[in-house]
Amino acid sequence: MSTLSRDLRRALENTVRQARRTAEPGARKVIEQLAVHHHEPWPGMTPSQRELRNRLRAHGRQLGDRHDDRRGVQGIDRLTTECAYEDWHRMLFARYLAECELLIEPQSGVAISLAECEELARAEGRDWLELAAEYAQRMLPQIFRSGDPVLEVALPPETRSALEDLMKALPRDVFVADDSLGWVYQYWQADRKEEVNRSERKIGADELPAVTQLFTEDYMV
C-alpha cells in the first residue's frame, strides 16, 4: 500500500490550506455579485441570474444561513464555505481520477489525462472542469452531481486560475497514494480548527466539524 511521505503530506497540507484561503474570498465575491445576501436582485441581473440567486438563497437557508424576514437580507457564510469547498474539491477529484486512469471519455471508453480533457474542452469551446465533471459523474455521482446550484456558481477568473495553479503544482505521487484523500478534508479544516482553538470560546455547530472530523491512519485502527 502506497502512503504519503512526510514531505508529500506537508506539500498537500500547504496546498489545501492555501486553496481554502484563495477559494472563499472568491466565492464570497461572486455570491455577493448575485445579490444572494441582499433583499432584492441587483438592477440589470438577467433572468437566469435571478433564478440562480433564488436557488442559492434557498440552499443557503438549508445549510443554516439565517434569513431576516423583516429586512429580507440573508447571511451567506455557510453558502460561501460550501461553494469554495465544492469548487476546489471537484477540481482536485478530477485530477485524482485522471492520475488513476479513471477519467473516461464516454464515446471512446478510454481513460484520458487532464491535459487531454483540456484539449477536448478547447475544441468544444467549453470549460475543462465542466467537461471533466460530465465525464466523472458516472464514476463519482455524489461529487460531480447535477442540479446543485452551488456547482453553477462560477468563481472569478483570477480565483479559478489560482486554484488551478495550486492543483497542478501538486506532484503525481500525491494523487496515487492510498491515504491522500483521507487527509484532504482535515487539511481543509486546519486553519479553521486553529482559529477555534485559539478563541477558547464554546464550540457550537459552526465550529464542531473543524475540531472533531479528523483522519485516522491505518496503523491507528
Image: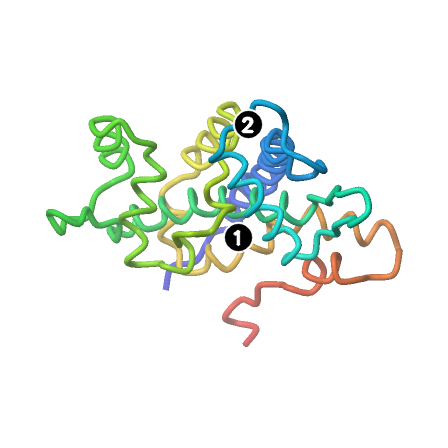
Q: Could you tell me which secondary element the residue under label 1 belongs to?
A: helix
- Tag 1 residue: 184
Q: Looking at the image, which is closer to me, 71 or 212?
A: 71
Residue at image position (45%, 29%) is 165
Q: Looking at the image, which is closer to me, 17 or 33?
A: 33
Q: How many marks?
A: 2
Dividing the image into 4 quarters, which one contains the C terminus? bottom right
Work out how far the residue at label 2 is from the one at label 1, CA to CA, in angstroms.
36 Å
Residue at image position (74%, 57%) is 206
User: Is residue 113 left or right of 66 when viewed as pictured?
Assistant: left
Q: Disc 2 vs disc 1: which is toward the camera?
A: 2
Amino acid of disc 1: Val
- Tag 2 residue: 45
Residue 177 point in image, percent of width and height: 39, 55
Q: Could you tell me which secondary element the residue under label 2 belongs to?
A: loop
Mark 2 neighbour density, 10 Å: few (under 14) some (14–19) many (20 or more): some
Q: Looking at the image, which is closer to me, 143 or 42?
A: 42
Q: Is residue 116 above or below residue 173?
A: above
User: Is residue 178 left or right of 215 when viewed as pictured?
Assistant: left
Residue 115 point in image, percent of width and height: 27, 33
Residue at image position (80%, 42%) is 71
Q: Is residue 217 above or below residue 126?
A: below
Dividing the image into 4 quarters, which one contains the N terminus? bottom left
Q: Is residue 159 above or below residue 141?
A: above
Amino acid of disc 2: Met
Q: Quadrant of residue 63?
A: bottom right
Q: Quadrant of residue 170?
A: top left
